[in-house]
Each structure stands twice: as C-alpha cells, then as structure tokens.
Amino acid sequence: MAHPTGPKFSATSYDFESYIDCPNLIGGEWTMATDGGEMPIVNPRHGAVMGNVTMSDAGDVDRAVAAAKAAFPGWRATPMKERVQVLYRLKQIMEDNLEELIWLLSHENGKLYGESRGEVLKGIECIEMGISIPNMIAGGQLDVSRGVNCRVVYEPLGVCAGITPFNFPTMVPLWMIPQVLVAGNTFVLKPSEKVPYGAVKLGHMLKEAGLPDGVFNIVQGGRAAVEGLCANPDIKAIGFVGSTRVAKIVYERGAESTKRVVALGGAKNHLILVNDANFELSTTNIPASAFGCAGQRCMAASALVVVGDCQKHVDEIVRVTQQIKLGETLGAVIDDEAVARMTRYIDEAEKLGAKVLVDGRGKKGPGAGSWFGPTILDNVSPDMPAGCEEIFGPVLSIIRVDSLDEALRIENANPYGNASAIFTSDGETARYAVERMSAGMCGVNIGVPVPREPFAFGGWNDSKYGHGDLTGFDGLRFWTRPRKVTTKWARQSDQTWMG
Ligand code: NAD
C-alpha cells in the first residue's frame, strides 16, 4: 500500500538526511516543470542539499489553473458536509504520521524539533477549524416582510491561489486550505521554493484523504510562478503571506486583474515593558518571543520599548538570553544571506551608537549551516534601521523611553502593524495601551499574541494589503462571496414595500 504521506522521510534526529526532488502537483499528477529549471533545497542546519525543487513558469501555472478550473464544478456540487470528510481524514493522517512531518519540517526549515512540533500541531488546529465550519455556519435568514424571506449563502469563488513564505512551510498553507476547500473552491498553492516539502506532504495526504484530483494543485517555484498566478484571469482570489515588498507587488498585480487579494506582509513588532510587569513572566516571555523559531516569525518581538527604569528586568532578559544554546534551544536561520543581513544591521547599529548587550555575530551551531546567535541591542533609537526595519532573525532592539505615551508614539509611527504587546500588572495601563496600539494583533503579557482559531489572523498598515484576514471565520469570508436570495411566497394580495 502506498505510504499515506508520499515518499517516506526517515530521519528521527537532526542528523542529515537527503530526500526527494520536489515536483508540481497538477490535476492529481506529480510532474516536473516543463522548462526543467530547478533549485537546491538546503537543510539550514547542515548547509547540505536535501533535493531539488522544480521551478515553474507561467505555462506550468496555467496548466495547474486549468486543472483546478476543471475540478471546480464537481467540488462545488459536493455538499459541504461531504467536503469536510476529507479534512477529518487529513487530520487523522497527519496525527498518524506526526513524527515524520515534524522531522521533515525541522530539516527543511532549520527550526528545532519542539518548534516544528508546535507548527504541525497548529496546522492541525487550523484543520479542526475547517472541520467545524458546517456546524457553525448555518443561519443568516429572516422574513423581512409579509411572505418575503431573505437569506444569504456564502458561495465559492472558483479557482483560488495561495503563495506562502519559508518560515512556516506546513502551517501557513493550512491557514488557507481548510477554508478554501470547505467553501467549495479549488486551489493552486505556490509554496516557498526554499521549503517545498511541507506542501508536497500536504498534496500526498490530501490525495490519500480522498480529495478529488485537480481540487488541490501545487506549482513550485519563485517569482515567475507568482507572476503567472497574478496574471492568470481564471484565478479569482489570492492569499499571500510573505515580506511586505512582495505582498505589495502581489496585491497591486492581483488587483490589476480584478482579483480579490489579501496579502499579509512583514513586521516590526513592539513589546512595551512597564516596570510593574510580572518579573518572571516578562523576563521569560520576551526572549521566547524574540528568539523562538530563530526570530523568523512574523509575530516575533523585535523592538522592546522599555518605559522608565526596568533595569532589573533587562538584566534578567540578558541573562536568560545568554543561556540560549545554538542547535539546542535556538535553531539555524534559513540561509547565509539571512546571516549576512543580520550582521549588517548589527554592525550599522553599533556604528550609530547602539550597545551590543548580547552578540550573535559569528556564532556557530552544531552543523555547517547558517547560524546566528541571539542578539540584544541596547540604546537603539527608533529611527535607526535596527530600530524600525524588519531584521527577521534572533535580534532584539531595546528602545528606552520615559513614558508610556512616548512608547506608543514610537509604536504608532512605525509603518508596520502586525503585532504589539504590553507587559504590565495594571489593567488600566494595559487597556490604555491596547486601545492606542496601531497593530492588528495586540497582546497583554504575551509575547506572541497569535489569535487562535476561530479568531482570524492579520495585521494592519504595511503588514497587510487588502481586506479581510486569513484563518478563522474571516478566512471563510475571504474565500467566499455572499449570494443574497430574496424569496416571496405569499398568497395575500396586500402590497408590501417589496411590491
Ligand atoms: P518572501 O516575500 O521573500 O517570499 C514569499 C513568497 O513570495 C514566496 O513564495 C516566494 O517564492 C515569493 N517571492 C519572493 N520574491 C518574489 C518576487 N520578487 N516576486 C514575486 N514573488 C516573490 O518572504 P519569505 O522570505 O519567504 O518570508 C519571510 C517574510 O514573510 C517576512 O517578512 C515575514 O514577516 C513574512 N511573514 C508574514 C506573515 C504574516 O502573517 N504577516 C507570516 C509569515 C511570514
């Protein structure tokens, strides 16, 4: 019998293992891109090539979209209660093969086993949300006049596409897949070319779960594939997750061809620390937020705005950070380009007067891959690049201010708006701050304020272009369009305002 997750990845430790080359999935067939271009898939811990990923162009995209278009009428006609059966089986397959999925994710992305486990489990939670939709979505009808009833039905859009980043190869596709499929759409997923294995596993598992061919397709590749998706007139909606630079391009290109687009972008998340903050909670949570997943989370703390005298807290955050061990409690970063970028930011901040309290430059982990140690910069000003730009690595910049209002002014002035959080023991201070933060996802005493299902995920300002959010019910709204049905069945002859 075929393995339910496709070719088996047999690693059960960080020891290097090579794996398959990554194909496209089009109309149920695994195929290589037609022009034959490929890119190496590098294990970031070891800097060694696991396999190659096929690089698609617009022609490959068009074939995948045609397959999705052909599969749409049949999938749309399948009752929602039957569509979700695929997700029940997908959840079961993922749970039965959890260890394999966790280790493959760790190998392709560089994150630690525990972080990979958290990602896969969060992906399964997204599936659970999808499964529960039919039991929660009923409603939306009213007799609006004598004998006249209005109801609203959320209809699928048709062929939809998802474009995803390198930092969550399994979870971010699962921010979209459940809602897209439960709604009755068909899908073309374009994963990050740096981490294509998570998507390939999802392709195999969805097939094993009984999803009809063509409903879920994968085009591997980079810019050319994304441009093909933006230009294809048969794609009705795109969900994008990645950097702000590309989010903007995808939003603009998609809108040009009248697609619905929600494009989640990059971040510079501010944590505000007030000196009444619970000592233990704040001094463990803040480094965990900044350095978990090697700082490569769009929800990671990257600017710590310290209000007044919090020196005791800062000293402890430094001490906790110094205990972090590369390869054991901090994973590899995605590639050497990322290492060079972080190094540049820290060199520059130092020249501009910041003090390096913990220095991750040049630190090596237990493999020949891409490593960067946890780093804390002090006395950063909000206009330094390290104080206002996304570094996307294990680097925390401390900005010192005298008042909460000043902290909020700095947070508000930053062009991003993904997440913000405050650490305080005072409810009024927390409420005052949250009401004034300029961010889509806010936290109190929590360093990574990710809204869990059924709440939706999405930032504000330059952290998101387009309307709506992904995940939760808002995700379902994004991937559907409301049909309003007004019906008059009335024997009485009296005229109502509806004639
Ligand atoms: P990225 O923008 O480089 O890549 C994202 C996707 O866009 C990939 O599939 C990639 O192949 C494609 N792409 C890259 N360059 C392109 C170009 N010039 N034209 C068209 N397509 C292109 O992002 P990344 O480096 O993979 O991921 C890290 C970024 O993603 C960070 O900025 C992080 O904050 C952000 N992110 C945001 C969220 C969120 O929810 N807001 C979640 C995860 C990651």
Image (spheres, rainbow, N blue to C red):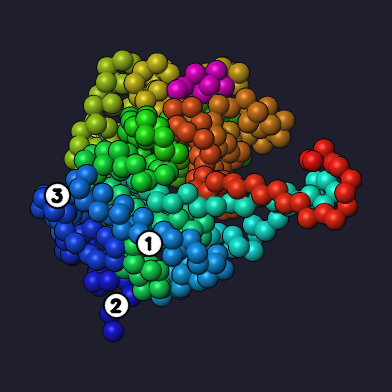
The amino acid beneath tag 3 is Met
Instruction: Find the distance from the CA under tag 3 to the CA under tag 2.
Output: 26 Å
The amino acid beneath tag 2 is His
Residue range highlighted in magenta: 407-415
Q: Residues within 10 Å of mark 2 (few under 14, many from 20)?
A: few
**Residue 409 within the segment the image draws in magenta:** yes
Q: Look at the image and tell me whether residue 346 can be seen.
A: yes
Task: Tell which residue pokes out farthest to the bottom in this image.
Answer: 1
Residue that numbered label 2 is attached to: 3
Q: Nearer the viewer, residue 277 or 212?
A: 212
* Element under disc 2: loop
Residue that numbered label 1 is attached to: 71
| Residue 126 vertical position relative to residue 446 in the rendered view, above or below | below
Residue 89, image x, y percentages:
46, 73
Check residue 39 in the rendering and tell me which mark sits there, or answer none. 3
Instruction: Find the distance from the CA under tag 2 to the CA under tag 1.
Output: 25 Å
The amino acid beneath tag 1 is Ala
Check residue 147 in the rendering and tell me which mark sits there, or answer none. none
Residue 326, image x, y percentages:
29, 49
* Element under disc 3: strand
Instruction: Find the distance from the CA under tag 1 to the CA under tag 3.
Output: 30 Å
**Residue 231 within the segment the image draws in magenta:** no
**Quarter of the image that includes the C terminus:** top right
Question: Which of the four quarters of the rendered structure image does ligand 1 lie in?
Answer: top left
Residue 498, image x, y percentages:
78, 40
Earlier in the chain: of badge 3 and badge 2, it is 2
Which residue is depicted at the point 37% across and 30% down?
Answer: 256
